[in-house]
Image (cartoon, rainbow, N blue to C red):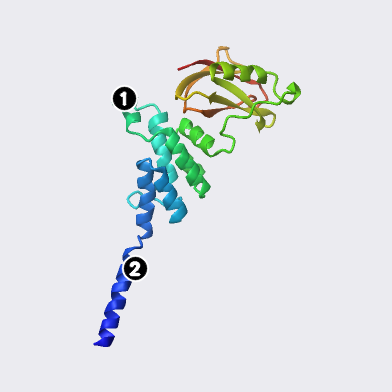
Amino acid sequence: MLVGCVLFVAWRGNVATGSTQAPPAAEANQLHAAIVNGDVESLRYWLETRHVDASSPNASEPGVTPLERCLGLAGKVLDDPPAGDRGSREIAGHAVSLRVLQEMVTLLHAHGASLSDADRQHFSPAVLRWHDDAVSPSVAPPAKPAANPTEAPASSSTQDLRIRLARVAITVASRASCNGSGHAVYLVNETQLSVTATVTTYVDGAQTANRDGKSDMYSVDPESSWRLGCDTDSDGRRVRYELTRWR
């Protein structure tokens, strides 16, 4: 009888211990649930406290990683709704905000999550630009140039003046090089509201019959920036960006 009691108590202890440990698949599902619910702190808990793999797929969708789920939600805001949808306003109302998704993407990236070349084929250029800016260390608006004008681009003082006056403007990051000889160009929003801006791009020396530039629209979160590209293209031609309007 004594041996039987001891074995019974040991069995109950093992059952209790096992019941407190969720299987890996269930923990992976918690990552995806936190993303869909826009719960950054829950995502942080499962990554930093429970050490769940940041690239764990959902049990019901083995082909979708947490990072891909974030980009899929971002696409509901950044991409134009397909024909037949009930409108972008309704879609955006049911989507997680870009600011929250940016925090989640940054957190996942810090824990080793990344997009392969094959994964990138599933998303639009607008979503990929948003992702690359979110995980780039230079995503913050670049610092204002030094007092010595020889250390900054010739137009930097004008750009800074436009930022101080309009608070939404285009600026050149003199320390962020790209395309070998150029510098990164950002659309900076220093307001407390999300803005939609139209930017027209001109390429000097482009061999086209129409000398008009190409216009694109960008949505920028409050106190955020969007990387437009470089002030020099891969062929060495100068690229100029003009902020046409914003609201």
- Amino acid type for the residue under numbered disc 1: Gly
- Residue on which disc 2 sits: 17
The one of 96 and 44 positioned closer to us in this rendering: 44
Residue 58 visible in the displayed image = no
Task: State yes or no: discs 1 and 2 in contact (Cβ < 8 Å).
Answer: no
Helix or strand or loop: what does disc 1 sit on? loop
Residue at left offset 35%, top offset 48%: 61
For residue 90, side relative to residue 142 (left or right)? left
Label 2 residue SS: helix
Placement of 62 over or under 77, stated as above or below? below
Q: Amino acid at mark 2?
A: Thr
Q: Residue 130: where, in percent of width, then height?
A: 49, 33
Provide residue 122's location: percent of width, then percent of height. 43, 38
Q: Residues within 10 Å of mark 2 (few under 14, many from 20)?
A: few
- Image coords of residue 9 (percent x, y): 29, 77
Horizontal arrangement in the rendering, residue 153 relative to residue 22 (left or right): right
Kindly indicate the quadrant of the structure image that contains residue 194: top left
Number of numbered tags placed on the structure image: 2
Q: Earlier in the sequence, mark 1 or mark 2?
A: 2
What residue sits right under mark 1 in the picture? Answer: 87
Q: Could you tell me how far apart the alpha carbons at marks 1 and 2 are, in whole angstroms?
A: 50 Å
The residue positioned 47% from the left and 27% from the top of the image is 222
Quadrant where the image shows the N terminus: bottom left
Q: Is 188 in front, or is 208?
A: 188
Residue 68 vertical position relative to residue 130 in the rendered view, above or below: below
Q: Nearer the viewer, mark 1 or mark 2?
A: 2
**What percent of the width, then of the height, locates residue 91?**
33, 30
Q: Where is 106 relative to 9, above or below? A: above
